[in-house]
Amino acid sequence: MKEQRNLPLISGLLMLPALVFQQNLLFLGLQTLFLVMLQPILGKRIRVLPNLIMLSTITALNLVQPYGRVLAEPLGFPVTVGALELGMRRSFMLISLIYLSKFMVIGSPRFPGRLGEMLSLQFSYYQGFLSTPVSLRPSQIIRSLDQLLLSLEASDGTVHVSRLPKRVLMFCAASPVLIWVCFAAGSLQ
Amino acid sequence: MSPSEQYSVRIKDVALLAAFALFLSTIEYVIPKPVPYMRIGLANLSVLIGLTYLNLKEYALLAVLKVLGQGIVHGTLFSYIFLLSAAGSFASALVMLLIYRTASRRISLIGISAAGAFASNLAQILLAGVMLFGSAAWLIAPPFLAAGLIASVVLGIFAEKFSRESLWLKKRRGAAA
């Protein structure tokens, strides 16, 4: 069980260099798309708007420093190829790493050492916080949070981890292969 | 209580406060925000509370657990976001600690919270400039810092009230004394 819950983490670590060292913007985009599309397959929701905001703001802010060939000049502002590519590369990289990160922690991985034990204890309490109803009404919030802290302080601190579904295990094996194929294709172009 | 039992209780305290930070950041995650990238910094409440009774080692451990826990829960542990979060949290924790240790009689948790938020936002803007936005990062600095200041003052007021009224905190301070 312990080894199984660390599989997405290991799989993600295998994929990481293929993303970080990807030079080809098109294939970096494809790798990003694959990692985003992985989320619904793993039973998670994709939130489109935050990704679009990240893509547009990072790209737009990079356009402020023009370099390379001028593509267009809307309202006298030069949109250059170099700045556009850099902005898109940075936003694809950020989005892909966020989704890779989400994939890597899907099995609630167990980290080694004393710090790992502390994290397990922290998550045990966190489960307690989430499973206890809290009143967030302004007049009661301090009392309510206080009661919660008092009750959790008395709990033992055990972590409950469920088995990973088969499709997750399948994607743990297949995803690094696909991501590295994209890396190889991008390097050959 | 033997020293080893006392140590175990204190370590559990740190884990509980770190879990409290995660819980607060989860609440923050579901609150709609008017400006992209805006953060309220609710999780900082547990660090402000920890500041008032944890020793240096425990306080540092709380900061590390808060950052790692948030990275795992929000799935950002292996992304740039984690580096931004870590830089902000550590800068904030350090500044708040320095102010608390040197001037806690003259500055309330409200001032400490505001200074922590300023340090956190400044560290994040600097890092975002290097990694994501380039020199244009300074374009987002004024609204980012202003929003952070307002949110941190509100959080500081809440932390002051919590610090005065919390029975749990009274108990913990009593045990620490």
Image (cartoon, grey):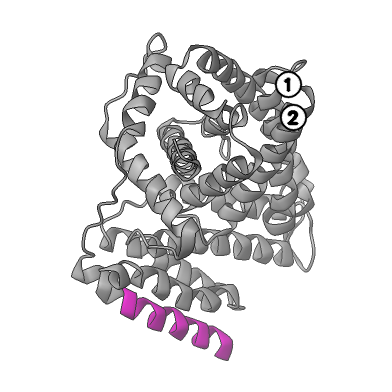
User: For residue A59: magenta?
Assistant: no
Picture quadrant where residue A144 is located: top left
- Residue topped by disc 2: B101
User: For residue A185: magenta?
Assistant: yes
**Span colored in magenta:** A172-189
Which secondary structure dominates the residues rendered in magenta? helix
Closer to the camera, B10 or B166?
B10
Marks 2 and 1 in Cβ contact (< 8 Å): yes
| Mark 2 residue element | helix
Q: Calculate the distance from the C-alpha at mark 2 to the C-alpha at mark 1.
A: 6 Å
Closer to the camera, B126 or A5?
A5
Q: Is residue A146 visible in this depiction of the protein?
A: yes
- Residue topped by disc 1: B104
Q: Residue at x 51, y 88 (%)?
A: A184
Q: Residue at x 68, y 64 (%)?
A: A86
In the depicted structure, whether residue A187 falls above or below residue A51: below
Residue A128 location (% of width, % of height): 30, 37
Q: Report the number of discs.
A: 2
Q: Residues within 10 Å of mark 2 (few under 14, many from 20)?
A: few
> Disc 2 is attached to a residue of which chain?
B
